[in-house]
Image: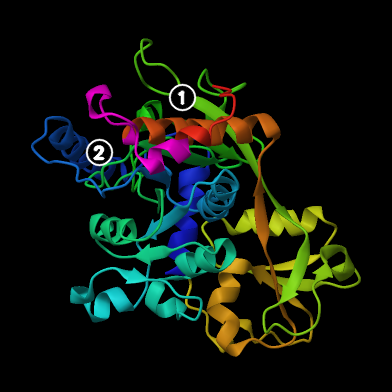
Amino acid sequence: MRDVERYLTALWYRPRRRPSLLQPLAWLYGAVVHARRSAYAQRWLRAESAGKPVVVIGNVTVGGTGKTPLTVWLVESLRKRGVQAGVVARGYRRSGRRASPREGPQVVRADSRWEEVGDEPLLIHRRAGCVTVVGEDRVAAARRLAEEAVDVILCDDGLQHLRLARDCEIALLDGARGLGNGRLLPAGPLREPAGRLREVDLIVVNGAPEHASLAGPMFPAGPSIDAGPATPAPRVLGMRLVAQLAHRVDGGSAPRPLETFRAARLHAVAGIGHPDRFFRDLEGRGLEVIRHAFPDHHPFAPRDLEFPDDLPILMTEKDAVRCAAFATPRMWHVPVTAQLDAADSQALLDAICLRIAAARRPPLAAGRPSEAAGRLIGAVGRPSL
């Protein structure tokens, strides 16, 4: 399975030079995507409200783009503006949803098992300290979250979940991977046609926009999106992931600066959507790493990390969630924090607060805005959009 995933990844992100044998399947997939979107556009299918404003954070490509760090950053940044955000997620590969689907949405606790709620929702809850709800049915999960004391619902990875009505859409792209070969699944990494990016409110590029697909009119130097000239391009913002200290997975000893691992080689383990980003970041800090890439959300077992030496093992924070039960003193994880420059940070938060306030503002005849809408309106400083 790992070999198949590696082959497809290499196929998706290499230059687009010749026709793909998978292209007929991509056309079929595209027809299904188009039919589904048309059904919602024509109101044959209807989006359902959660009862509170919803911000969707997603992507148009398969694989990691940095949604989890950005979600944590948004929760913390909105809180500083007096806006309480909660998070809804599917809880990918959690065993609980298969074991008893009738139980409905599940609220994540600090002591929840990742097998039951998913690794990313558990990480978000622990890092951001916000109410987090997981569920296969995102509408039901969002409505459960709306019962809590939150002003805004952040939907992690819900861009294609059209049944959940939303007030703001943020699409993330990886700067090194971009849109890949520009083809739809399974011939390429795209979940939706690239033109879908014209419809979102904001695009956030994680890391330097190195990929050739990010060199069109949409971007600061920017992808070439197939849409009509009358369609306004959404604002494109930059983000980077920054790591400072390594922490023991078993909680023992104090955190260490990454530079202290330069003395010898080490094992770098990554079971995330884009392992190479983690490896490159470590190597960029002067570390000599032995790379071990695993599929995203890989359910680690002790045998996966039984390397025939005593070298340190560095892994991502998401991997550490799945390895905590059998952690040894040689295992360290490296948390990352999303960072945006001041202008982009202001633009992103202003855009979210303005759109949500507009969604909560009642008609003029109805009188004064609700208390939640007032908080959101007050959370906007001087808009920079």
Up-down relation of residue 33 to residue 252 (above or below): above
**Residue at the limit of the structure toward the front, as seen here:** 367
x 38%, y 22%: residue: 226
- On the image, the x and y values in percent for residue 316 come to 63, 66
Please report contact status of discs 1 and 2: CB closer than 8 Å, yes or no. Answer: no
Residue 366 among magenta residues:
yes
Q: Quadrant of the N terminus?
A: bottom left
Residue 338: x and y in percent read 64, 49
Indicate left or right for 4 with 215 as reference.
left
Can you tell which quarter of the image residue 245 is in?
bottom right
The kind of secondary structure element at disc 2 is: helix
Instruction: Tell me which label, 1 or 2, sits earlier in the chain.
Output: 2
Nearer to us: label 1 or label 2: 1
Q: For residue 376, which numbered disc appears in the image?
A: none
Foreground pick, 46 / 8? 46
- Magenta residues? 360-376
Task: Tell me, yes or no, whether the highlighted magenta stretch contains residue 338.
Answer: no
* Viewer-nearest residue: 152 or 201: 152
Residue that badge 1 annotates: 234
Q: Which of the pair 207/337 is nearer the observer?
A: 337
- Res 30 label: 2
Distance, label 1 to label 2, CA atoms, is 23 Å
Describe the colour scheme in one phrase.
rainbow
Q: Residue at x 66, y 39 (%)?
A: 340
Residue sitting farthest toward the left: 44
Give amino acid for label 1.
Pro
Amino acid at dot 2 = Gly
Q: Residue at coordinates 37% horizontally, 64% vertically from top-left?
A: 133
